[in-house]
Every structure is written in structure tokens, then in C-alpha cells.
Amino acid sequence: MTAQQSDRRRVVLVTGATTGIGLALVKILQQSGDRVVVTARASSLERFSDEGIAEDDKTLLRPLDVTNLDEQSRLVDEIKQKWAGVDVLVNNAGVSYCAVVEDLTPDALDEQFAVNFQGPMNLIRLVLPYMRGRRSGHIINVSSVGGMMAMPAMGAYSASKFALEGASESLWYEMRPWGIRVSLIQPGFVHSNSFLNVKMTHLSQASVDGPDCPYHGYYENMSPFIARMMNRSSATPQSIARTILRTMNQRSPKLRVPATADAWLFYYLRRGLPRRLYHYMLFRALPKIASWVR
């Protein structure tokens, strides 16, 4: 048996690790005995030095565009050569577009699904052969409350997370006989400035800028509402990271793991209320809904 084969420290691959939940998770993992492959777009790698994260004998920093299959393949091949394979994959990288359906564009839809759905699926395919060979491993997909419910002007984002949840559920059944665990982490509102990174299409930006645009009221009310909810939330990237680590360390983790108080609230509302009443209540709770159409 080689030294590489006898050393069974977990190898954890984290995507989208320069900010927020991904960065918080990497900092926690660096305090553990795990080997960590920390990834982000090449243009963002310099941020790691600002956060005190550097390569050492159990940390790799690598550029990764999750929409680029060639980059994904090269990275997984490198991990195989160095550490045999990936034991835990944390698909955390994501993007969010703010646009009502009529304001969506084909390019925005393509990017939304490429980052939030196709990228994670491709990485999963690449790491599964090693996990199946060992009959163990853990796929952790960071989803969202947006994967269990939808909000106006967030249709493309929710669609990508719904897709991620559906594929993950299918994967849970497929991998159970192989001893491979699959988990969806579902954060809701998190106290951070991530809402500032939400993207707009040229059409949604025109609706924001134009008071006479038919959907102006949607953006005018939803964006401040989301900002308020995030600023008031007690959940932080660090608390979500701790939830991911707990899930990672469980022998039999759940498929779906609500990670914030509001995620649990929506989980129980969906289970306990008739669907028609559920949707009516959420519609009436939208901020200043009576003023949206002018």
C-alpha cells in the first residue's frame, strides 16, 4: 500500500470560495485535518491572500470556471494524481439574475443554468467514479430557499435551483447502493452583502430605471425588501458553513437540510398548508403588492 493510499484524510473540493459561504467553509476546513481544494475564477484568486489563505501540504488553490468542462476535468485529474480523488464535493459557486420572466434574455438564462446547474452536474460526474470505487463519498450541493419556493423577479434563479434539487434527489437514489451520500443545503436570507452581486439583464435594468415601465413597481419594491430581510437575518455565512460541516460529518445526513430559520419556516408552511392557501398568503405578503401595477 502506498503512502497516498494509506493516508485517508478526506479530500474536500469547494467551488466559489472567495466570498460568503464558500470562504467561511474553507476557513473552517483549514482548522480540520481535511485536505482542501479551494477554487474560484482566476480573476478572483488574489483575494485568498487577503484572507490569509495560502497553499500548504493540505491546501490547494486552483482557478476554476465552473462553466468550463475542460478546466473541471484538468482539476479533477490533478487531484487524482496528487491525492487519489475527491471524497467530498461542495458545489457552492452560484450566480443570481434579477428579472421578471418578460425581462429575461437568452444569454442570462444560459449563464444562470450554466453556473447553478450544469457546472455542478459536470463536476459530480467527474468525481463519482472515484467515489463509487471506494463505495463512499459525499456530494453537497448548496441550494437555496429559492429551490423550494419562488419569488417574483427571481424566476430564472429559482428554476436553476429547482433543477439542482431535482437532479440531487435523483442522485440520492442512484448513489445510495454505493454508499455515497447526497445533501442539499438550503439557506434562506443570510446576513451579508451578497444581494449587491445580483445581476440584471439590460431589460430588467431598463425597468428599474424607467418609472413608466410596466414592471418598475416589481423591482422598486422587491429589491429593498430582500435587502432588509438579509440585513435583519441572524444567519451568517459562518453559521451556514458550520451547518455544511456538520452535514459533512454525519454518517447518515438528510437529503435536504434547511440552514436558516426562514428556510425551516417555508419548509413547514409548504408541508402544512393547502397549496392554494400557501400561494395566496405569500402573494399577500409581498411588499406593497397593491401598488405594483400602475
Image (cartoon, grey):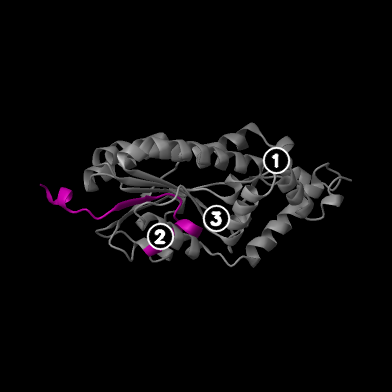
Tell me: 144 left or right of 92: right
Task: Please tell me whether mark 2 or mark 1 is closer to you in this view.
Answer: 2
Q: Is residue 265 rendered to the left or right of residue 68?
A: right
Q: Which SS class for mark 2?
A: helix
Q: Secondary structure at mark 3?
A: loop
Start-end of magenta stretch: 1-28
Q: Which residue matches tag 1?
A: 202
Q: Residue furthest right?
A: 294
Q: CA distance from mark 1 to mark 3?
A: 28 Å
Q: Which residue is mark 2?
A: 246
Q: Secondary structure at mark 1?
A: helix
User: Mark 1 is on which residue type?
Assistant: His
Please give the residue where the numbered disc 3 appears in the rendered image.
Answer: 187
Q: Are marks 2 and 1 in contact (CB under 8 Å)?
A: no
Residue at left offset 52%, top offset 58%: 259
- Viewed as shown, does residue 59 lie left or right of 217? left
What residue is at 62 percent from the left and 57 percent from the top?
A: 265
Amino acid type of the residue that numbered disc 3 sits on in the rendered structure: Pro
Q: Tell me how far mark 2 sits from mark 1, CA to CA.
A: 41 Å
